[in-house]
Amino acid sequence: MYQFNFILNDVVHSIDIKKSETDKLASEASTIIQTYHFSMDQILEKNIKNDSGTCFDCPFSFNQNKGNSGGCYTHSGIIFLGLCAKVKSLNKLLLAGKIPNYSNDIINQIKKKASRLNIDLLRLGTYGEAVTMPINFISQLIPLAKKHTAYTHLWHLDEYKEYSAYFMASTDNSLLSSIAKNKGFRVFEVGHNSESIQCLSDPKLPKEQRVNCSRCGLCSGNKLQAKSIFIYNHGKKVNI
């Protein structure tokens, strides 16, 4: 695995290039890029639940549910344990002065490494809000993979309107989906929507019918002219 870490806008960004660990994203033989975004408080305090600076007003976050899980799929099981381990690792690197502030050298390093690999999928925002990275940085990441996925809960803020080029608006009801579409976003809605396409990797689908993200690529914002997407809620509220 190759990892690139940097600080920008009080957020610690971590970009991993590695083999896929789940068939939902890509086959195990595939190389993927995943981006993670943690608030400085999360890293300094080694507390994943202190997520207001990176999950913001997401209804599934800890900060919007009085410190309890709001049902985000990242809040349980192996995924949650992996995120906690990553926070601890980044804490050590940060305290040792080994996480630099962002510079153009970062994207050049990533592009150089990626050019030697066959990357099937770029997953923006594996954890946290990827829109905390500049749009011109993201636009240089997009061509490094055959397909990409990206979602944001901050679609309602005008300052992120240009991110609709690459990001889906993440919503949890039809009213918000309608508002997001009026703002120029394609939508990824948690919950059934008859006007949208069901996510092809939805766990509610029979396993033999599912298509992983690296083969699908529908969740790529306005880069792709297609219908919006919905997925049935498959997270669960847990006490951590």
Image: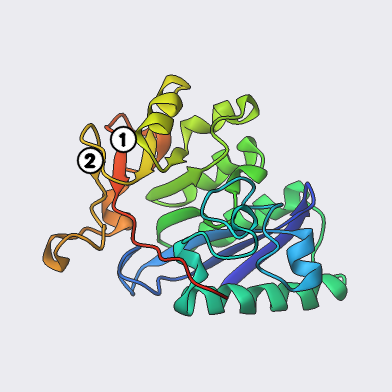
Point out residue 189 in the picture as x, y percentages from the top left corner: 36, 42
The residue identified by callout 2 is 197
Residue 88 at x, y percent in the picture = 71, 78
Q: Residue 137 has which mark?
A: none
Q: Residue furthest top?
A: 182
Residue type highlighted by circle 1: Ser
Q: Is residue 224 left or right of residue 35?
A: left
Which residue position is annotated with label 1? Answer: 228
Element on which disc 2 rests: strand
* Relative to 185, residue 112 above or below: below
Q: Left or right: 140 with respect to 76?
A: right
Q: Check whether the beta carbons of the residues at disc 2 and disc 1 lie within 8 A of each other.
A: yes
Left or right placement of residue 146 versus residue 68 in this view: left
Residue 60 in view of the camera: yes
- Residue at 55 percent of width and 39 percent of height: 139
Q: Amino acid at mark 2?
A: Ile
| Residue in front for this viewpoint, 229 or 24 | 229
